[in-house]
Amino acid sequence: MTSLSASLVRGAVTSPFKRAGRADAALPPGRLTRPAAPVAPGPLAAYARICGFAESGPLPVTYPHVLAFPLTMRLMTGRAFPLPVLGLVHTWIEITPHRTVSVDEALELTVYAGELTAHRRGTEVTMVTEARVAGELVWESRSGYLSRHRRPTGETPPPPPAPPAAEELPAVAEWRLPGDLGRRYGAVSGDRNPIHLHPLTARLFGFPRAIAHGMWTVARCLAEAGESAELRSVRADFKAPVLLPATVTYAADPAGNAFALRGTEGRVHLVGAVTRPGRDDTP
């Protein structure tokens, strides 16, 4: 956790000197790797509890992302990374578990920056994470992080297509999220971005209150589905921030191929799609 704390301090220092949207911006070409190491049972149990996963069985499908987060932060707070890390918003994630991972397997983790693209609200970077066991690629993910800023006139990409009938998915469960959820999940995951911690720090980045972590919302949805170990792939798009405290509704289709998280006012916060071995891959 010491290296992660150092990255957070470095990010706070370097962010004011970085300007998103430069025409000549380039991503760092290197990769960061953590040598193979076993999963610590204490932090894993704390993560399982706050997300709703079972505290026994295979590694939760979202957990390698958490284990690799210190590497991600080190890369994104480095001098060569073009975007200011403070205020970055997680916009989507795609996870591909190539096989079930046991909690006693030693994971080697690698992180690198994939690409930099224009977004209608700023500039988005794609970060890639890979997990290996004895050289075998067992898990990988791609994540989008948005640096919000105004784009020059004529350079604004069109908005993404509307989520597929997210409002029509049947409700499955309702959750009341406390105001300190961001601080609690940040303590477990290491993601202490100020937008998640307190209303005062969130307001510095344009949010009226602290917002829930996107990775908590997708993990909680997958834990509720109870089949995270059987997934071939999962894609989640974070459509609107969950302002804390909040009451949200988890919704999913009966076949289990699509899910969503909605607010009490009907606003769609998250839209997800999954595929599983031996089933129709079309959500």
Image (spheres, grey):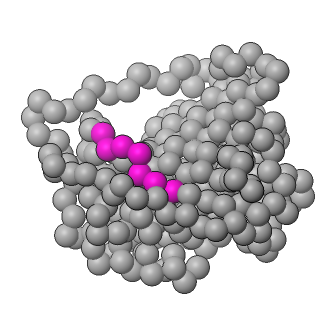
Q: Residue furthest front?
A: 135
Q: Residue furthest right?
A: 56
Q: Is residue 203 visible?
A: no
- At horizontal 85% and vertical 63% (from top left) the residue drawn is 104
Q: Is residue 161 above or below residue 261?
A: above
Q: Main secondary structure of the magenta part?
A: strand
Q: Quadrant of the N terminus?
A: bottom right
Q: Is residue 100 magenta?
A: no
In the figure, residue 195 lies in which quadrant?
A: bottom left
Residue 202 versus residue 13: which sits nearer the camera? 13
Instruction: Locate residue 81, reporting x and y percent.
Output: 31, 61
Left or right, 153 with reference to 53: left
Residue 196 versus residue 266: which sits nearer the camera? 196
Count of numbered tags: 0
Magenta-colored span: 111-117
Q: Is residue 273 above or below residue 39?
A: above
In the figure, residue 144 lies in which quadrant?
A: top left
- At horizontal 45% and vertical 81% (from top left) the residue drawn is 6
Instruction: Locate residue 30, reporting x and y percent.
Output: 40, 58
Q: Is residue 72 above or below residue 116?
A: below
Residue 268 versus residue 91: which sits nearer the camera? 91
- At horizontal 54% and vertical 83% (from top left) the residue drawn is 2
Q: Is residue 255 visible?
A: yes
Left or right, 128 with reference to 257: left
Q: Is residue 218 above or below residue 66?
A: above
- At horizontal 32% and vertical 44% (from top left) the residue drawn is 116
